[in-house]
Image (cartoon, rainbow, N blue to C red):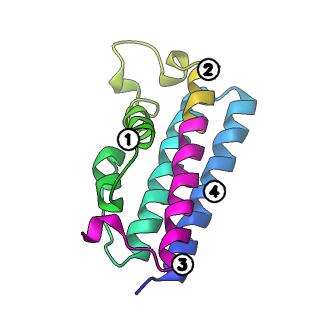
Amino acid sequence: MLDEDEFRRWIKSARHTLSSARRDLSAGDFNWSCFKAQQAAECAIKAFLWGIGKPEYGHALTRLVQGVGDIPDDIYEACARLDKYYTAPRYADMWSEGSPHEYYTRKEAEEAIYYAELIINFIEDRWKFLKKGGKNVSEG
């Protein structure tokens, strides 16, 4: 049985976080934009997993997305790209010198937002399919 309330709770958080990533992009805070794009995608994937009653923990998108079922190559690639933005944008000790904000560009932030949007849309479409009676591919 699908848990629509749980799905909505997580997907709302995904969309809100993506909006915050866009604001950071506009402000020139590219490292935070990259991190928040990763977080938005993570919330979206967790929306699906919690919504189908298979909650998962952790932050590796490439691992989490496996629970969604058959994943197109572009979605897996987007997850792999965003996985790199979980830790490094936030911690100075991830870099040999300087601060995280010195290592990220507008183009990277724009791409991160694009990938997060791609994942969120995929998850929302997959959820709609299940709601219409489609079978979750991960169920076999």
Query: What residue is pinned by disc 3?
Result: 132
- Point out the tag, 3 or 1, that comes first from the N-terminus: 1
Against 97, is 79 above or below?
A: below
- Mark 3 surroundings within 10 Å by alpha-carbon count, few (fewer than 14), some (14 through 19), many (20 or more): few
Question: In which image quadrant can residue 86 be found?
Answer: top left
Which amino acid type is marked by label 4?
Arg
**Tag nearer the camera, 3 or 1:** 3
* Cα–Cα span, label 4 and label 1: 20 Å
Against 2, is 63 above or below?
A: above
Which amino acid type is marked by label 2?
Lys
- Point out the tag, 4 or 3, that comes first from the N-terminus: 4
Q: Which residues are magenta?
A: 114-140
Quadrant location of the N terminus in the rendered image: bottom left
Query: What residue is pinned by disc 4?
Result: 15
- Mark 4 surroundings within 10 Å by alpha-carbon count, few (fewer than 14), some (14 through 19), many (20 or more): some
Residue 123 on image: x %, y %: 50, 58
- Tell me, yes or no, whether the two marked residues, 4 and 1, touch with CB atoms within 8 Å: no
Query: What residue is pinned by disc 1?
Result: 76
Which amino acid type is marked by label 3?
Lys
Against 91, is 71 above or below?
A: below
- Point out the tag, 2 or 3, that comes first from the N-terminus: 2
* Cα–Cα span, label 3 and label 1: 24 Å
Query: What residue is pinned by disc 2?
Result: 107
Front in this rendered view, residue 25 or 72? 72
Q: What residue occupies the far top of the structure in this picture?
A: 97
**Tag nearer the camera, 4 or 1:** 1
Please tell me which residue is depicted at 55% across the width and 33% down the height of the picture. Answer: 112
Residue 33 on image: x %, y %: 59, 36
